[in-house]
Image: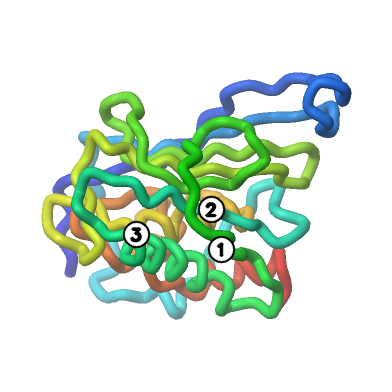
């Protein structure tokens, strides 16, 4: 059984919903922005309520968001970091996260486009994953710009106030683990917060050194296929 003492909660926050004239940004008029933030939590998951063994391949639970990409999500990675990670290692971890989802559907959900120097969190017609500074207590933030049921742009920012790892080191956040969960939001899946869903990738808590979210569970796969087909 994995004992969880320090947890992170991924909370959904609607930032703003507004109309933008087509002449301004050449976008559909009803544009909304949603932000997911992975936040430090003082709460503890009751160990007695967590399945003692990994049951992710038999748990069919999932929850869908009301929007998703209607076409392949092309994404760019800004590999710049203060942890000494090489560009190739950063790209490998993030593309592995995307491939975890792509491998479970015949649709092409993601397409890696290369590296960039662009930052995350700004509407610029690039779907960017990058490290950057964010407020204390937030580990990572995914921004989704959407109109109706269609996602128009998505960025994910990894907060460089925290220590990160590419190998699941204790006391650090694992890039592939967190990005696999965040890519689930890009796919149109929402968080799960019931303790029985602990072993699923879309379970809305994470802990330092955690790597199990790298591998999709049955519910994660069923949710993906409900959106994109088998």
Front-most of 28 and 128?
128
**Crowd tier of the residue under label 2, counting other residues whose Cα lies within 10 Å: few below 14, some 14–19, many 20 or above:** many
What whole-number distance in Å separates the C-alpha atoms at marks 1 and 2? 6 Å
User: Which residue is painted at 27% across and 30% down in the image?
Assistant: 137
Dots 3 and 1: beta carbons under 8 Å? Answer: no
Which residue is label 1 attached to?
Answer: 112
Indicate the position of residue 215 as horizontal and vertical percent values. Answer: 40, 73
Label 1 element class = strand
**Crowd tier of the residue under label 1, counting other residues whose Cα lies within 10 Å: few below 14, some 14–19, many 20 or above:** some
User: Which residue is painted at 53% across and 64% down in the image?
Assistant: 61
Which image quadrant is residue 43 in? top left
Indicate the position of residue 67 as horizontal and vertical percent values. Answer: 71, 47
Query: Which quarter shows the N terminus?
Result: bottom left
Which residue is label 2 attached to?
Answer: 76
Left or right: 51 as drawn, with respect to 130: left
Left or right: 104 as drawn, with respect to 54: right
Indicate the position of residue 20 as horizontal and vertical percent values. Answer: 79, 21
What whole-number distance in Å separates the C-alpha atoms at marks 3 and 1? 14 Å
Label 3 element class = helix
Whether residue 30 is visible to the viewer of this picture, yes or no, is: yes
Q: Earlier in the sequence, mark 1 or mark 2?
A: 2
Which image quadrant is residue 25 in? top right
User: Which residue is painted at 75% across and 59% down in the image?
Assistant: 71
Indicate the position of residue 230 as horizontal and vertical percent values. Answer: 69, 79
Which residue is label 3 attached to?
Answer: 87
Name above or below for residue 52 compared with residue 12: below
Left or right: 69 as drawn, with respect to 34: right
Dots 1 and 2: beta carbons under 8 Å? Answer: yes
Dot label at residue 181: none
């Amino acid at each position: 059984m994995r004992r969880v003492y320090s947890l992170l909660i991924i909370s959904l926050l609607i930032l703003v919903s507004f109309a933008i004239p087509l002449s301004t940004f050449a976008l559909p008029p009803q544009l909304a922005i949603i932000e997911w933030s992975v936040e430090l939590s003082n709460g503890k998951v009751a160990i007695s309520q967590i399945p003692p063994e990994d049951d992710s391949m038999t748990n069919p639970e999932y929850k869908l968001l009301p929007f998703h990409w209607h076409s392949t999500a092309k994404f760019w990675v800004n590999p710049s970091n203060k942890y000494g990670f090489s560009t190739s290692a950063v790209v490998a971890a993030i593309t592995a996260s995307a491939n975890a989802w792509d491998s479970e559907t015949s649709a092409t959900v993601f397409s890696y486009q290369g590296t960039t120097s662009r930052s995350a969190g700004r509407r610029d017609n690039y779907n960017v994953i990058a490290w950057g500074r964010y407020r204390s207590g937030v580990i990572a933030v995914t921004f989704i710009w959407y109109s109706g049921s269609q996602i128009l742009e998505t960025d994910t920012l990894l907060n460089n106030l925290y220590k990160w790892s590419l190998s699941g080191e204790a006391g650090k956040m694992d890039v592939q683990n967190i990005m696999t969960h965040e890519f689930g939001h890009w796919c149109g899946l929402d968080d799960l917060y019931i303790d029985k869903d602990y072993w699923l990738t879309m379970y809305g808590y994470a802990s330092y050194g955690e790597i199990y979210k790298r591998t999709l569970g049955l519910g994660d796969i069923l949710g993906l296929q409900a959106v994109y087909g088998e």
